[in-house]
Image (tube, helix red, strand yellow):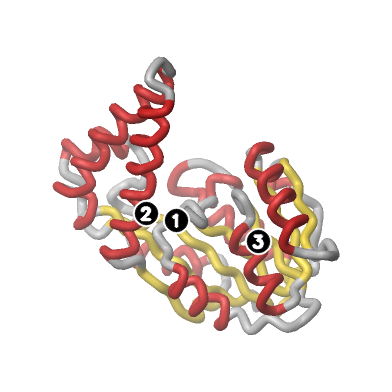
Amino acid sequence: MLWNSPISEERFEAMARRLDLQRGSRVLDAGCGTGEMLMRLAERYGILGVGIDRSREAIQKARSASATRFQDAPIEWFDGDAATYPGSGFDAALCIGSTHAFGMGADAFGLALEGLARRVKPGGLLLVGEAAMKRRAPAEYRRLLKGFPPDSMTHASNVETVLKKGLQLVTSWSSTDAEWDAFEYAHQAAAEKAARERPRDRQAQEKLEFRREWIEAYEIWGRNTLGFVVYLVRVP
């Protein structure tokens, strides 16, 4: 997986074009993971970036890949808390499937919008990806989802949150079944491979057991229940 979200490469390219970045634009990626999105923006548009993630391992991978792909250093990488990062004055900010960096539960989306908006220049853009329920989760599927996302967290409620924060919704993209299938089965393949290669690793075997239960639930309920939407938002 290039990034830990149900977004195809073609979809990312479309989203990147709408950011209207220029050479030297400053871009923040909160919850950047291994940094693929930020590095692609740097390769295509010559942006200057900052990537933050709580996973030290992910940031180490991002630094290593960045050193291989760039002669200079257009991106700074930090392992830490995006919510407390002091930087500001960015032209755009990303947070794709990582709103938990700003808080947990249904409030995380609003908190992420607020946190990112404070760090972006007036007129700048936010690209934020979040879960959105398509319908109420059946009890069997809710057992796996647990409390998040709640049934009340829909695309419509997310849009309302954007507007209540005083932000302008520019456009949005909903992940397709094909994007979800690619995402879920990439996770499944990784779990199967890890369990085969480490047959005595209890953690790998337990993860595989969970993934097998999850993929069955995905096929029965998940495809028609759990959505993912990326919102392009302008800061006044």
Q: Quadrant of the C terminus?
A: bottom right
- Mark 3 sits on what residue? 116
Q: CA distance from mark 3 to mark 2?
A: 26 Å
In the figure, residue 213 lies in which quadrant?
A: top left
Label 1 vs 3, first from the N-terminus: 1
Q: Can I make out residue 28 in this image?
A: yes
**Real-space CA distance between mark 1 and mark 2, rounded to the nearest whole angstrom:** 7 Å
- Could you tell me if residue 31 is visible in this image? no
Q: Tell me the amino acid under the disc marked 2.
A: Phe
Question: Cβ–Cβ below 8 Å for labels 1 and 2?
Answer: yes
Which residue is label 1 attached to? 5
Viewer-side label of 1, 2? 2
Secondary element type, mark 1: loop
Q: Is residue 179 above or below residue 226?
A: below
What residue do we see at 54% from left, 51% from top? 99
Q: Position of residue 226 (x, y in %)?
A: 28, 54
Q: In the displayed structure, does residue 112 sit left or right of residue 143?
A: right
Callout 2 secondary element: helix
Say whether disc 1 or disc 2 marks the residue closer to the N-terminus: 1
Q: Nearer the viewer, residue 115 or 143?
A: 143
Q: In which image quadrant can residue 214 be found?
A: top left
* Mark 1 crowdedness (10 Å alpha carbons): few <14, some 14-19, many ≥20: some
Q: Residue at x 17, y 36 (%)?
A: 140
The x and y percentages for residue 201 are 43, 18
Q: Which mark is residue 183?
A: 2
